[in-house]
Amino acid sequence: MTAAALPVLALIDGVLAGASRIAPAVNALFFSLLLVSATVALGLALVIMVFLVRYRRGSAAPRPPLRWAEWKFETAWIAATTVIFLGFFYAGARVYLRMAEVPAGAAEIAVIGRQWMWEVRHADGRRELAELHVPVNQPILLRLTSEDVIHSFAVPAFRLKQDAVPGRTVAAWFEATRPGRYPIYCDQYCGTQHAEMGGEVIVETPEDYAAWLAGGKEAAPAARGRALFIRYGCSGCHSGNSAVRAPRLEGLAGHPVPVEGGHLLIADESYLRDSILLPNQHVAAGYAPLMPSFQGVIPEGDLLDLIAYLQSLAGETPPANPPAP
Amino acid sequence: MTTPSSAPPAGENYFNRDYSLRSWLTTRDHKRIALLYLASITGFFSIAAVAAALMRWELLTPQGDLVVSDMYNRLFTLHGVTMVWFFLIPSIPSVLGNFVLPLMIGARDVAFPRLNLLSWYVFMAGGLLALYSIVAGGVDTGWTFYTPYSSTYSNSHVMAMAAGVFIAGFSSIATGLNFIVTIHRLRAPGLTWFRLPLFVWSLYATSLILVLATPVLAITLLLIMLERLFGVGVFDPKLGGDPLLFQHLFWFYSHPAVYIMILPGMGVISELIACFSRKRVFGYNVVAVASLAIALLGFLVWGHHMFVSSQSVYAGLVFSLLSFLVSVPSAVKVFNWTATLHRGSITFDTPFLYALGFLALFTVGGLTGLFLATLAVDVHLHDTYFVIAHFHYIMVGGMVMAYLGGIHYWWPKISGRLYHEATARVAAVTIFVGFNLTFFPQFILGYLGMPRRFHIYPAEFQTLNVLSTAGAGILGLGYALPLCYLGWSLFRGPRAGANPWNATGLEWTTPSPPPEHNFDRTPVVTQEPYHYPEPGA
């Protein structure tokens, strides 16, 4: 029994303490809830037990009528529970708001869930499967999305969990405070190999992390996106010598675009994404809605690279469009 | 015991009037319909329990050695769908409610007896279709049917299962409607609203939810079917839909459904505690109104299932606040039940043991619900075994204990016989011990991060899983016992008489089993409920 329990103890040590900036706050909440709940439950159990013994049928205990009116008791315990509950609501909400607020200077990493693996894309173009290398004491902003069904990126030791929802990109952040390896689970049921869709966050000291970074580089996302821009045929229409009249994309990202219907939109990431997947939703003013949808054609990973490429063109000025034929 | 009755031959009652199968399948007697439900949901419960047993057996070891993942995924879907829609939701309302509601209010039957029978047929049609989907190859979406997995990706028999649940929903609506009209229109003379037994109040609150929430489930399932069959983009973003829309719709039904599953149980507990402590329920009015408050507030908390779904942070705040508020009436009920014991005259018959079990387990389930309503803590615990343990404490520890308590309490009325008391007490204690051993370790597993719906797991989690599986074995044994001794009592049990517990309430004033139309003459009510003699008098 004790031998079998040992790994549990090791796990309890790892998980109980937590290994992220937010973990102590969540622990404090959890254990104050536990303390209050246990007190209430044991107190209630004790009271019930005393009543059961004292007022068992045939006991000699006196049973005079109550001295106070019922409504006084009702008011007292309705008020008491409401106040305690509101206290927990407030405490939980404060920590939740902290979880929602991304600290300045967080390093961005894209995470894509797909049946049944986690793919990680670092800003410098590195990709990892089922592993996530991060330096200790550095806030990390995860930009989560999914290629197919809903997954959930969960790292219990960091008290971190966020669903990865197809069709949208969601932010979640953490800051690891202890080097080590921490399990990642998929917590949202996603099909046959849901239980195998795991991985590890590998938290390293700055030196180890630098060494890991130095070990082999991949092309940057924007460079990969440039190749994809040609491969998916985007350049066929969106470059100077095209027969089809389509807007040039240099200098587009982050700038206002006039669209059909007479209003302006900012070409942020979600605008770029929508323009690729649902091109007829917002057609640039003065252009015909000719572009086909790339929904289901461009996988999520390639989409991120394409957007990175378009964003890398933000500072350029488009060459004058050739006059319409 | 012999009870003289005027019109029908002496000794004739609803049960022995006609034994033919035809008479049962065409009956419009609420008591017989209750027994039809009793037999059918016992069957569904057994199927779902076997699925749970196989899951616990698989989880004995960290590897996937008993079943492969696809099989395991089908087992937990089967377990969830069957337990929720074909056992828990109909359990107390359709069995105990059908049997005792008209008796408790002094009526000859429910308001619409034909609709009541139709309700059972519709329920069976839905249930059999759901069973067909299992025989045909099973469904692997989980009982929550989350999109786009269920609407586009799953290769299993989602259509048949969703259609089964869709159809069974109409049975819920019909039963709810029937109860609402019955309670409004068929109360005996003098039985004013605040003279109603608390079980009737809780059935009334439950019926409101059945009628108002179930249509939303029907719409949601229909939309899934549209997307699966015709590719209409509602939930799958690849078709232009929104997967979170499904969660909003689903939980808009399914959270109130949690109260469909627990409110009637609370009603039963009020009856049991009053009867076995010989006292009026403390704070009767507050307990009655609390049922309505729970039913109402229960509609406004669905978003607490979505704190990590990428729903807006501010929506999260509002749903958390409302979730804490909906817990207040539940907590107040627990305090009132405890206060009822004070200065009572308590006996420890089997139904009361179940009521005590309910008090203990429901309190743990309710308190752990507060952990999950606390936003930041839910982020850590969401979709882990902590949630599994929490809702089993409510659903099994609460509802099933109340259901069994109610079955034991009204069994003499239903069957006219007494069961073997000592065996029944042993079974109640076995169930309590087995239940805690099964589910308490799961709180710890969840806190340590073990996700739900895993057929394999890291080796560190094994000790706690072994404890849980051992508990499930004891629990299974506990559930098998009542089947044996209640069955035995039908033939050999001593005659119960009209009122074996010396309880108040109109149902105890008519013979056991009651005659076809319940009362020889319509009772007139002149007193508040639970008018037990003053203690010490």
Image (tube, rainbow, N blue to C red):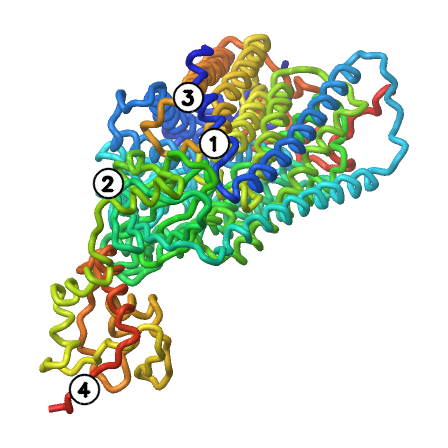
Q: Which residue is labeled 3 in the image? A: B465
Residue kind at label 2, given as amino acid type: Ser
Image quadrant assignment for residue B179: top right
Percent across and percent down for residue A107 are 39, 54
Tell which tag, 1 or 3, sits nearer the viewer.
Answer: 1
Q: Which residue is labeled 4 in the image? A: A321
Q: Are marks 1 and 4 on the same chain?
A: yes
For label 1, the crowd category at 10 Å Cα-Cα, with few meaning under 14, some 14 to 19 and many 20 or more, is many
- Of the 4 image quadrants, the one containing the N terminus of chain B is top right
Residue kind at label 1, given as amino acid type: Val
Q: Alpha-carbon distance for marks 2 and 3?
A: 28 Å
Whether B377 is drawn above or below A96: the answer is above
Q: Alpha-carbon distance for marks 3 and 4?
A: 67 Å
- Label 2 lies in what chain? B
- The reply to whether the C-beta atoms of the residues labelled 1 and 3 are less than 8 Å apart is no
Q: Is residue B126 visible?
A: no
For label 2, the crowd category at 10 Å Cα-Cα, with few meaning under 14, some 14 to 19 and many 20 or more, is some
Tell which tag, 3 or 4, sits nearer the viewer.
Answer: 4
